Amino acid sequence: MSDPRAARIPFAGSKAANLARAALAGLPVLPGFVVPYDDWSGHGDLEGLEGLRRAWQELSADGTRPLVVRSSSPQEDTQESSLAGQFASVLDVQGWHEFRAAVRTVLDSAHRPDGTVAPMAVLVQPMLAARVGGVMFGADPVEGRTDRMLVSAVRGGPDSLVSGEQPGTNYWLSRWGRLLRTEPDDPEGLLGADGLRRLARLARQARGVFGGPQDIEFGFDASGQLWLFQSRPITAMAARPARGARLLGPGPVAETLPDQLEPLEEDLWVAPMARGLAAALDIGGTAPRRQLRSLPVVTAVGGRAAADLRLLGAVPPRSRWLALLNPAPGARRLAAAWRVGRLTAALPGLAVDLVADVDRRLAETPSADRLTRPDLVATLRWTRTVLVSLHAQEALAGALLPEPRATAAGTALAALTESRALGVPDDRMVAAQPVVLALVAPGLGRELRLPADPGHTEGAAAARQGATPTAADTDTLATLDTLPAASPPPLPSLPPREALRLRIRWVQELQVRLVRDAARRLVVRGGLGEASKVGLLRWREFVEALEHGRFPGDFKERLPRAVSAPLPDAFRLAEGGTVVAERPVGKGKGGSEGVGQGVSGGRAAGTAWDSTGTRPADPVLVVRTLDPALAPLLPGLAGLVAQTGSPLSHLALLAREFGLPTVVGATDAVRRFPPGSRLTVDGTTGDVHMREQEEQEQQKEQQDQREEQQSVGQAPQGDPR
């Protein structure tokens, strides 16, 4: 290892080369030797290698000292990929015959599952009986922080930790070795303050030698000497939002747009909502106009609508005392007070006027198939403009007017129940009672399916499970597309906010019909391919295709968005649009039902799988521990959940490299999440939830509320969705 050639990765492999460089720099590395991979060719029996037995005799003291035989491939421990745990190492090797077998084991591990053979050198060092060992990262890869270090230690050598057999004790250190946090508690002082300081110094030295923070395996021997067993680059750091990144969340916008949206749906519904809410906040003086112009109040993340929670006032200021000292909010409120005071009195009248204008335009609009192409585009432009006004007034009404006793959703539910009692079929329900649209979310390509009758258990269960659309469902769509946009029948008197919310939904439904008719025209002209692809266009592209027949050059290659997990209640965006959930206080520490420790950020929804049987299309692997043998299963997984394991184990490291949401320490996960369960996994907060159970509990709670309201003769409040 003192030969300069040992420090060359193409010659000696990454593991041996890194240790040779560290030894030359004075870091505490055990002595040893490396056999370059080129030397193995033509020597299948190992006897033909000149000097191998002599080197073994010298290092092992003629077989009396046990050795470690380790892989050292140029393909592992690189800047791009660690291939952690993918090649073999053999511990406690004694005797010449056992040594030859260990070397053969390492060489055989170079044969990859895909049929390729990795170049493989072999590194040999003395076996050290460590008192304490573990893994140290010169940065915190779980939190994505470079200003601190993360150490995980166990009694004995680090092999039981990196294999996932033991979770270890975790220490978070400052760059100078000051202890910041320990999990779990360490009453025995496994490493001690002096050991932590020495580890921090070793991490700083390794950073200087290799030019960046390192993933280090270490051990303390019986005399307290610290040894460096391995050093490689940190290949996967968790996404970390920039300082000052906005706090986002579904918030109240999920009531209007609860489903995942395609690009055209974003432009039709999210953009007008953002402009309308910005106008309301500007009128109310609750945010600086410059900020409202530069940051959209509502945006789409992975096709799901999310709002700026601070702009909407859904979260308190970052510092309550600084907020009290800041004169700007008070000045804005004072400047806006006279406007808001007069607006509160005028708002009901303004809402009545806007509702009347919308109803008149809806009544005057002929069915989509009777509109010329220019009229169809003009009508769609009007819908996007009027949605801005409707959202603005609806937001102001919600903030300034008394809470309504009657709601559009409650009225819709009563109309639905009454019409079904009279025998009106669902495929004619919208034509007879347009108010029922308040019960369903808009969608260009989704079937318009009304809520199941709460009294019919089978129907409710089918709706929960997303049953296959029946012929009646398909007929409903066809009927809706041919209905004229006639004036709606008289409604019970609704408060201003609820009347505005209902018109928002009616305008959205008009947009759906217009876009579907336009899609049929584009299919006839041969540019769209099939009507279902219309949602892949942006608004400007859609208008360009409709007016001039021109489609984007990459349109034929565009695919529908993959189903994304629901957004966290509160999150920030990191570079590349990665969602980083805001970790609630006390979460992600493990030990509570449904909560483990997040070790690889991201959020995913999928189907629980135990690695046996048929692999689902969106598998979330649920296992007892992070066994490195599971590594070949990682590509294509939606998520990974383990009952035990360390965030610094080899499989956790590989999961971060794959960008795979991963949670460890999920109590009794194998039993609680059987194969086939629908799961949501958050690799940042450590939350794992069964989606069916959550949905059933929510629906039962809503049903109980409806029954209680009906029993006292009140109209149901809120949105039954």
Image (tube, rainbow, N blue to C red):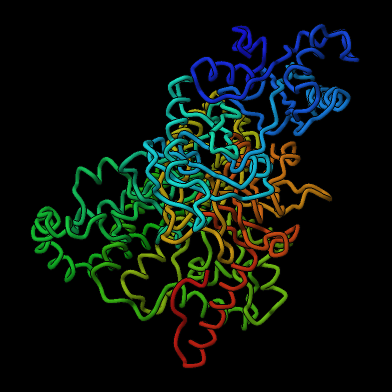
Image point (53%, 45%), residue name: 602
- Image coords of residue 258 (percent x, y): 50, 58
Nearest the eye: 464 or 646: 646
* 640 relative to 185, above or below: above
Q: Is residue 444 visible?
A: no
Q: Is residue 489 left or right of residue 310?
A: right
Image point (71%, 54%), residue name: 624
Image point (49%, 36%), residue name: 542
Nearest the eye: 85 or 248: 85
* 545 relative to 593, above or below: above
- Image coords of residue 662 (percent x, y): 60, 47
Q: Is residue 553 visible?
A: yes
Nearest the eye: 644 or 447: 644
Counting every numbered tag in the picture gives: 0
* 191 relative to 583, above or below: above
* 561 relative to 81, above or below: below
- Image coords of residue 575 (percent x, y): 43, 35
Where residue 521 sits, quadrant-wise, is: top right
Where residue 347 sits, quadrant-wise, is: bottom left
Q: Is residue 206 left or right of residue 654?
A: left
Image point (48%, 25%), residue name: 206
- Image coords of residue 612 (percent x, y): 82, 50
Where residue 693 sits, quadrant-wise, is: bottom right
Where's the N terminus, which quadrant?
top right
Nearest the eye: 718 or 695: 695
